Amino acid sequence: MDEEAKSKLEELQAEIRLKTGQKITQQEILSTLIQSAVDSRSEFIDSFRDGTTALSEPELEEFNQGRVASGVETTEDDIDDILYG
């Protein structure tokens, strides 16, 4: 753990003691943080993505409204022919 992370962990530990009156170890804090990440696994994983996150279900439904399948299967070769001739 780098010094910045260690310092933030110590600050968190002090704030917990100040606000709750309970002395909590850094190991207890880390265990609770890990459990929280596991409980919210997809949100935790998304926090590591660059840029925007994946669309939510309502956003996907809105995106797909009005789209119609033509029934024609398009291959990579078809796309290449259209784009590059």
Image (spheres, grey):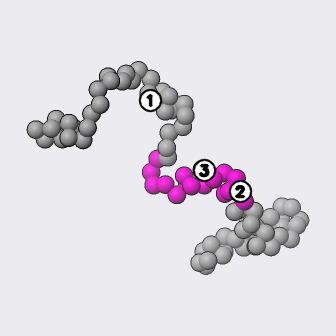
Which residue carries the number 1 mark?
A: 63
Q: Is residue 51 above or below residue 84?
A: below
Which residue carries the number 2 mark?
A: 36
Which residue carries the number 3 mark?
A: 43
Q: Earlier in the sequence, mark 1 or mark 3?
A: 3
Q: Is residue 73 above or below residue 52?
A: above
Outermost right residue: 21
* Residue found 55% across the figure and 34% down from its top: 57
Which residue type does callout 1 highlight? Phe
Q: Residues within 10 Å of mark 2 (few under 14, many from 20)?
A: few
* Residue found 48% across the figure and 27% down from its top: 62
The stretch in magenta equals 35-52
Q: Earlier in the sequence, mark 2 or mark 1?
A: 2
> In the image shown, does 12 or 47 lie closer to the viewer?
47
- Marks 1/3: CA–CA distance: 22 Å
Which residue type does callout 2 highlight? Ser
Element class at badge 2: helix
- Marks 3/2: CA–CA distance: 10 Å
Which residue type does callout 3 highlight? Glu
Is 62 on the left or on the right of 10, as rendered? left
- Marks 2/1: CA–CA distance: 32 Å
**Which numbered circle lies on residue 31?**
none
Asked if residue 45 lies in the magenta stretch, the reply is yes
Q: Earlier in the sequence, mark 3 or mark 2?
A: 2
